Amino acid sequence: MDESDEDPKTGLRTPENPSSLRLHDRSHLDHTVLVMAPMSCALCQNAKAILKRPKTGQQICKECFFFVFETEVHNTIIQAHLFEPGDRVAIGASGGKDSTVLAYVMKTLNERYNYGLELFLLSIDEGITGYRDDSLETVKRNQQQYNMPLKILSYEELYGWTMDAIVAEIGKKNNCTFCGVFRRQALDRGASALEVDHIVTGHNADDIAETVLMNIMRGDIARLGRCTQICTRGEDTIKRSKPFKYAYEKEIVMYAYFKKLDYFSTECIYSPDAYRGHARTFLKDLEAARPSAIIDIIHSGEAFELREDIKATQKQQQTCKRCGYMSSNDLCKACTLLEGLERGMAGSVITDRARKKLDAMGPAPDNLRTIPHFQSPRPAVSIQSPSQES
Amino acid sequence: MASCGNPIADDSALMLSRPRFDKGKHCVKCKLNLGNIVIRHAVYCRDCFTPLVIVKFRRALEPHVNANAGTSKRPKLKASGSLVLGFSGGLGSAVLLDLVYKSYFAGRPPTDENGDPRGGINHPRNVSVWTSCAVCYVEVSSAIPEAHERTEEMRSALASYPNLKFIPLRLEDAFDESWWCRMTGNPDMSQLTLELGKDGLPTEGLNLAHSSNTLSPKDALRAFLTALPTPTAVSRAIQVLIRLLMFFTAQFHGASHLVLGSSLTTLAVSLVSCVAQGGGHAIREEFQEEWPPGLSPGVERGGSVRVVRPLRDVTMKECAAFAWWNGIRVPGRPRLTRVITGIPGLTKDFVVRLEKDYPSTVSTIARTCAKLEPKGTSVGECWFCYSHLQGGLADWKARISIRSHPNLKVVERLASSSPADSSVHPDQTSRLPPLDTHLCYSCITMFTSRSSRKSSFAPPLIHHQDMPLPRWVKPQDAEEAIPVSKNGELWVRSRQSEKECRESIADFLLPDN
């Protein structure tokens, strides 16, 4: 690809000068990745190799890198039968590198392989001053560049609380619990508003490998059983999938860098999850020792499953009695957390034990702010066993 | 040892560490004595601590002693064969040796006036659980640069445990024809090798060949380790060799049980390390396994050996306290140098540090992994490590990472312009199947996964063209793969080195200048 400001394949405009980009995160592109010695590409044997693939160690040219990166994502999509022609698909867009590259690659593959998808951008505004407002500006530019409809849904609109207000109430401890629970539900509600069938997110191989390790160390067997699935779907929620499941974070950054994509890069100012920090640091050490470690961990996660007798003890999924969202208890986690915030006891609703303590203090007052009732765009799926069918 | 707190986190955002003595300073068991040790926030005195460890040891071992569980709730313990104890000289195996000896071999039955066991030797009280116990030590000094021989040191450490047989092994026995012949009773002359590329590392296809060189076992071991691409691979290879040497030895000695001194901490490290090296399909084998796993080529199927880790509920800290208070001599295991520890070493550092801040972590890791089972069925055993083999690995790997250009024209051009070395010799490889389809994911990764950090293990004095493989790596139809002429001569085809080739035509070559 020449370095003009328009991609010949997609027709997307890219910034003319890399230095004029809002922010290009080059920290991931350390000297071990970029190859200085003139060497021919290990794939086409034609062009000069300019990078060493973190995933395979092969020294390849830029064109071949684009080709293998996009084709691997395409293989992942086809193998898992993620889409049907005519599907309306929302891309979870934060303005960061993963979701920006995902939007670009989804648009490229949709046109190249005629998936027949209708693509949307869906952003959640958590209400973090100085972090999310800047990244949302990037998403708005992506909307223009990629010509996709954009829907922004805010925590304030949905829950009546911004993350700034939540942190002011509870401090930085456990705030990631609130943000994670609220975001998951907000994405589903945003997708419901867009009437889409499917949400795709930019979770990459590093994220999944890190989650496998985290779930083993925390003993979260329910999540361990499903964290390597490419596609998850509750009975009555919107299908959610991760096309970048096998894409290394470093390669996503390289792709954004060489394609000169416009993305926002900074760490959330409220994310002091010490335990996850350990897992992330450990994973980076493993990757440095042997780059295949990331894929090896994902392979491990795909190669085991929960024992049948353990699966039988897992809680059955039901719907929240207050908001109608999927839940494993009478109240979903978001309603529980919101009730804690509204009653001024947010710090005591993180665990199930604390929830029981809250219940013991009496029923929730009638004037409590609650989450609007969830209406799935799709009818609830009832699963029939073969015997029932016959 | 430094704490592993997140360096980028704001202090005010972190949860405070729980106080160590959060339930008082008195022993939680007898509630009388002042505590001497804290185990996961519970305080124990020295008097209560020792029986606690013994109970954990027996509870982990005894349900696995009898071949069949039977119907009795408290069946009489009787193993079907002898006991082999894997001894590394480390803390866990030293504690295990002491516990096994004192629990099952030290006590003498009451005797009558003639000195014979009262009630006769066949009285149930006088029958020991195992007929005998042997302690197996694998000397690894040949694999570790600048390490010294420690076999005699280990032998002397066993002096205080009479009646235990000592079985010294060496890591290079895995490449020793006479050892293999003794274990299997089968005089098998052939040894397989893996072809190496110009970079001295195994080629992608893992092509097998018959060995033409007659390297000593020690040289073969070193050639094998030197050709591995990463420190992680060297570390795993040593671990697999030790494991299989002990399995074959235990079976040869008619053992019904092989006990290993893996503590809870070591088990947690092994589990995380296993996951990090792609061994999710074999995760249950980290807890317990039976040997042989299926039909092992060349080995007569006798009684199976059950591998048990009786210290799997005892942490490293508990082992250390137990050894200290009971005066157990711990010779210390030879430490793999930093350059060859790789992922197992990193995992150990991580888990041990994490255990300091989060004492329940190792227990959580072990309990979580105990709830897992392999997905799908096994399609056989790995030829290298004998763990269960998962199907469809090649397809999976090809799908998730493209390593060649699919454009036919490019492929043709590549084929026509491929360098002469190409390291694949059709006439040679056609006789043996490629190894990659017969290896588990972890072993394929061990041979093929590369890193920018080259393995700095023992730089080779001589560059070998092939990588010798352990004697147990045999295809099912290995015998048929060796051509035999009508007069009974054995023909072994092997790759000719560049040097050999040059020597054969030396008379016809003009000097370079």
Image (cartoon, coloured by chain):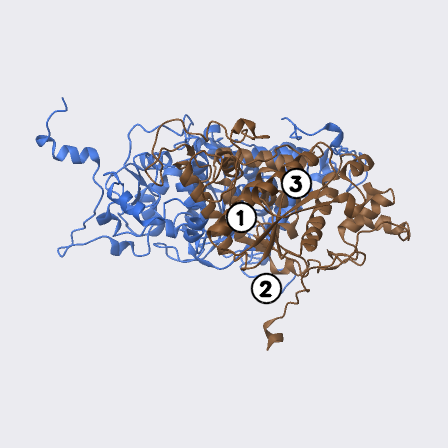
Chain colours: A brown, B blue
Residue farthest bottom in this picture: A390
Q: CA distance from mark 3 to mark 2?
A: 35 Å
Within 10 Å of the Cα at label 3, are there few (<14), some (14-19), or many (20+) other Cα atoms? many
- For label 2, the SS is loop
Judge whether residue A352 can be spotted in this image: yes
Marking on residue B140: none
Residue where numbered disc 1 is placed = A106
Q: CA distance from mark 2 to mark 1?
A: 60 Å
Nearer the viewer's eye, disc 3 or disc 1?
Answer: 1
B281 to the left or right of B125: left
B200 to the left or right of B348: left
Residue farthest left in this picture: B508
- Amino acid residing under circle 1: Met
Kindly indicate the quadrant of the structure image that contains residue B227.
Answer: top left
Nearer the viewer's eye, disc 3 or disc 2?
Answer: 3
| Marks 2, 1 in one chain | no
Choose between A83 and B221: the one closer to the eye. Answer: A83
Kindly indicate the quadrant of the structure image that contains residue B410.
Answer: top left
Judge whether residue B126 can be spotted in this image: no
- Amino acid residing under circle 2: Gly
Q: Position of residue B391 (x, y in %)?
A: 44, 56
- For label 1, the SS is helix
Residue where numbered disc 2 is placed = B70
Task: Name the residue at 40% across, 58% down.
Answer: B295
Residue where numbered disc 3 is placed = B361
B188 to the left or right of B91: left
Q: Position of residue B326 (x, y in %)?
A: 63, 34
Choose between B399 and A94: the one closer to the eye. Answer: A94
Q: Position of residue A32 (x, y in %)?
A: 46, 29
Q: CA distance from mark 3 to mark 1?
A: 40 Å
Which chain is indicated by disc 1? A
